[in-house]
Image: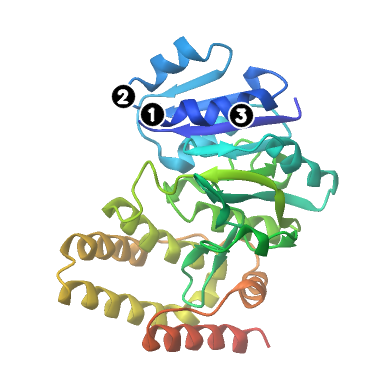
Amino acid sequence: MLYSIVIANYNGKHLLKTCLSSLVPQVDQLSNIVVVDNGSYDGSVEYMRSDWPGISILPLQTNTGFTGANNSGAAYSESEILVLLNNDTRVSPDWLRNLLLPFADESIGAVTSSMRRMGSIDVMDSAGGALDYLGYSFDRGRGEPSSVWTESDELLFPCGGAMAVRRSALEYCDSVFWDHLFLYNEDSDLGFRLWKRGYRVVYDPSAVVEHALSATSGETSPIRVKYCTRNRILVLKRHLGKEFEKVSKILSCWEIMALGFMLSHGQIGRFRASLSGFREAASTRVVPYGNSKAAIDLLIRFMQPSTGSHIRKRMGSSLYSRLRSSAF
């Protein structure tokens, strides 16, 4: 089998019909689709079994997060190309074909889709991922006209919500993501690993998919705030290795200021979630992955200036300058 499509689902019964109705006409056989259910209690598994016979269903007993579900799907399948798709999407008619075509080039490790806003296909949701000077991940092109993003290019990491990865480009064939992350920033870690292993990550503008942002977890939910804070730091720790010490003070200073801002503005829930993530990141020992010099080179190449307040821009520029001085 050339490809398998892994869809992670957690209480997403209300999303599956839209996703699968657009996807099923594109597959060679229904068993190519693997829906990994993360212990849903909304009847998702029963719905799949009754309304979508032939699709592979992998029910898990507990919520293993986005990383665990996709890794389970990767281990379950045996295809060379692993396609990952969020349940809150609707794919365009030629999406799968166009997503797979670039893999004819053996140097390509992953391809990311041209993700558009659900119901507004001319507005970008993501042209793949990037990091700003403080290490925050963001989606390239979000909110911009799709006409701006018509050219294929290289990028640091694919968007895990609609992408494909070559299994042989992974260090472990049954695992796509660093499972410790659980949720969020797993795709940025994947990008670092693919580039370090000698593969390229590319954006394909012809692989179009509509996406309803954060339909499962919520864009500003405490769980999102916690894991984005924690995992952003862990990914930098992992790939910068000993070089992380050169930027750790700047990162810590920024986090403390951000926490102070939340507290002073009465954002108690966000403060607690962010503090929890920061503490976990600071106390977690991480085994370095690959060459730290390669990570610095990637950051210098792909990082983009921080936006927002003057102090945020200034601290981001300081961190980026520290990385550049380490490269020479």
Does residue 105 appear left or right of residue 137 in this picture?
right
* Residue labelled with disc 3: 23
Asked if marks 2 and 3 touch (Cβ < 8 Å), the reply is no
**Residue type at mark 3?**
Leu
Calculate the distance from the C-alpha at mark 3 to the C-alpha at mark 1: 16 Å
Is residue 213 left or right of 121 when viewed as pictured? Answer: left
Which numbered dot is residue 318?
none
* Amino acid identity at mark 2: Asp
On the image, the x and y values in percent for residue 194 come to 68, 55
Q: At numbered mark 1, what does the secondary structure look like: helix, strand or loop?
A: helix
Amino acid under disc 1: His
Disc 3 to disc 1: CB gap under 8 Å: no
Q: Quadrant of the N terminus?
A: top right
- Check the image and report above or below for 29 versus 104: above
Kindly report which numbered mark, 2 or 3, lies closer to the viewer in this rendering.
3
- Left or right placement of residue 88 versus residue 309 in this view: right
Q: Nearer the viewer, mark 1 or mark 2?
A: 1
Which residue is nearer to you in this view: 168 or 307? 307
How far from the left and from the top, in percent, is residue 28?
73, 21
Q: Is residue 298 left or right of residue 21?
A: right
- Please give the count of numbered marks on the rendered protein: 3
- In the rendered structure, which disc, 1 or 2, sits on the residue that comes first in sequence? 1
Q: Position of residue 242 (x, y in %)?
A: 53, 74
The CA span between labels 1 and 2 is: 9 Å
Mark 1 and 2 residues: CB-CB less than 8 Å, in contact? yes
* Disc 2: which residue: 42
Q: Is residue 146 above or below residue 20?
A: below
Tag 3 secondary structure: helix
**What residue is drawn where x is 60% and y is 43%?**
209
Percent across and percent down for residue 73 are 55, 30
